[in-house]
Image (tube, coloured by chain):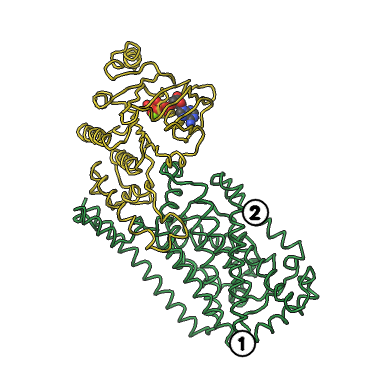
Chain colours: A yellow, B green
Amino acid sequence: MKTLLATEGLTKAFGGLVAVNRVSLEVRENSLTLLIGPNGSGKTTLLNLCTGVLKPDSGRVVFRDQDITGLEPHQIYELGFVRTFQIPMPFIALTVLDNVLGAMRSPGEDPFRAVTKAAWIEREEEHMERALAILEKVGLERHWNMPSASLGAAQLKMLEVARGLASGAKLIALDEPIGGVDPARAGDILTHLTELKKEGITFLVVEHRIDIAAPFADHMYALDRGSIISHGPPDSVLNDPKVIEVYIGRDEAC
Amino acid sequence: MNGVDKTGSRMQDVWMKNEVVIGLVMVAVLTVIMLTLGLSLVLTILIDAAVFTIVTLSLNLEVGHTGISQFGRVLAVIAGAFVVGAVPGRVLAFLNGLPYGVSYADDAVNYKVVPAISDLLASSLPLSVGFLLFSFLLAAVAGAAVGWLTSRPAIRLKEAYLGISLLAFGDFFMWVGHNWEPLVGGTTAVFVPDPFRVVWGSRFQVVVIVAVIMAFLVYLYLEKLTRSPFGRTLHMVRDCDVAAAVCGKDIVRIRTQSLMIGSALAAVGGALYVIYAGTCTAIGFTRLTWTFWPWAYMMLGGIGSNRGVVLGVLMLTVARTLIITYRSTLFGFLLTWGIDPMWLEYTLMGLVIMLVVLFMPHGLVPAKVESILPAGRVRKAAQEQGFGATVG
Ligand SMILES: Nc1ncnc2c1ncn2[C@@H]1O[C@H](COP(=O)(O)OP(=O)(O)OP(=O)(O)O)[C@@H](O)[C@H]1O
Ligand SMILES: [Mg+2]
């Protein structure tokens, strides 16, 4: 399998705190790669660096053999790489449907063409069909016409996932997509991701709920205090003494 | 779920009622004013309302739809007013062998050249119409240019910083115009050639009709623009710019586009105003009148609601005009308490803003959360997917 995304020595510090420390990882095409690590280990920061939300202090990000370090998020989107947010960031004054439609590209986004409906309405109707199908997959079909601000926390998580899926990206990074979602729904979502892999989509998933997510992973990375401490097939990572120590150690501390 | 849907549509009914009731009340008020105080006061109200509808709708595009802290609306208005005060008259002066250079704006020359040009315009309807259209086009281009220019330093700034820089730009331009005489006469006004002299006799009525039609066209244009995928991207940038960027939207470009379109429209408003007034005085373009009043109109009407903005402008213009017309005759008694009725107008503005913020933060016609796309199309698509039952 080809490498779709690779980071090389990626580093980011906030003041004195090195949140991501020389991280090099690879995401293979058509895989579901799981990124685990205790709270504050740098998982979200790593996604921010990969998707242009933050600029790294040093290191490179390579996507489809192209150096994307320092590109803007929308440029990275154009190349086929999107991410979702751990803390949902809905467009609160848009309906649920428009939140999903907004993640797609439409000819009507051009201000000159926007005023002639004929220039975009057909494409928008196709998008609507796709968006509604995606909303059904994540269980929001009954809420499609409501303001996104009226959704609950778990539903907002699902809206994030829906927006990620709607983008039509080659690589979708999901930051804790099933946090707070009931286990049955969470299993459904992960099963759906596995199905989408067959359509050529690759996933990089950050998740705390390892018990639910690990069975769906092809490959796994464990992060602790900004550095990768273990990687490989899920079984070997979960049985790695370093990983066990990080998690057990944390549990005892609590 | 069904319950929520019902509440949604019931709230929609209330909003609808607001718009209709306020609209009817305004028609009634204008009728009463016409019957008791005369038609010309109504026409004055309508021309002011038309100009400020254009300016405030443009403000609403940037503030309400895009989330830009536009505290310098006056800037684009000035761009339109100055360019129409300075350029089209000079072009005609040049073509007709009249003084067109620096001396055009000199008050000793200007008061002779411009009437000569106006006479020329009065002799030909096509020339007058051409002059008018050319002036608006010029204003729109100047406005868009100013919008683009201000977007350069401003676009990366956030909220308060952006707001204060835009405000400073606006004042800067006013003072440039006030002190640099060749532009629009500096401390003295320049006259603006009158393309409406061709319909002398009924000039005022025709100006009002043209202005109202223009305001209506701007409203229609902005309704179309904001209810399109482009409008959706504006709302995305407004609601959460980081998420919009991750969803593939170039937020710098979208903010720039919004500033350029908004400023072009505001400039057309400024152009309309000086053509109607027949003069252009730099010092008249204060932030009080051209930034803060539009903000008050917009806040009263409902930020983000094009329809609300139109009603807000109309209501407050009636109040303003009545105050300005009658402040010395009816409110003269305030002087005995040491209050100059000159300032009533501004007191009203402050009062409106305070009351709206306190009691009606979303304005008279709050912006609705509804599908950007035509409701019928959305419904159809949903029904085809078997989601028909939940359609409100
Ligand atoms: N913008 C920021 N400014 C300063 N410090 C930050 C910033 N973002 C993250 N950090 C710090 O960097 C470290 C890594 O944070 P990050 O959010 O990447 O962790 P995480 O692995 O996603 O944690 P969680 O599981 O809680 O989501 C934390 O110590 C955090 O406090
Ligand atoms: Mg995180």
Q: Residue at x 43, y 39 (%)?
A: A79
Q: Is residue B295 visible?
A: no
Chain of the residue that carries numbered disc 2 in the rendered image: B
Q: Residue B279 appears at what percent x and percent y?
A: 68, 74
Are the residues at dot 1 and dot 2 in contact (C-beta closer than 8 Å)? no
Q: Nearer the viewer, residue B6 or B271?
A: B271
Residues marked 1 and 2, same chain: yes
Disc 1: which residue: B200
Query: Which residue is situated farthest in the top direction here?
Result: A241
Label 2 SS: helix
Image quadrant assignment for residue B189: bottom right
Q: Residue A60 appears at what percent x and percent y?
A: 49, 27
> Can you say which quadrant of the picture contains the C terminus of chain B?
bottom left
Q: Distance from label 1 to label 2 (Cα)?
A: 38 Å
Label 2 environment density (alpha carbons within 10 Å; few <14, some 14–19, many ≥20): some
Rendered image: mark on residue B298:
none
Disc 2: which residue: B169
Q: Is residue A233 left or right of residue B152?
A: left
Establish if B376 lies above or below A8.
Answer: below
Badge 2 amino acid: Phe
Chain of the residue that carries numbered disc 1 in the rendered image: B
Badge 1 amino acid: Trp
N-terminal-most mark, 1 or 2: 2
Q: Residue B126 appears at what percent x and percent y?
A: 59, 82
| Image quadrant, ligand 2 | top left
Q: Residue at x 65, y 85 (%)?
A: B122
Label 1 environment density (alpha carbons within 10 Å; few <14, some 14–19, many ≥20): few
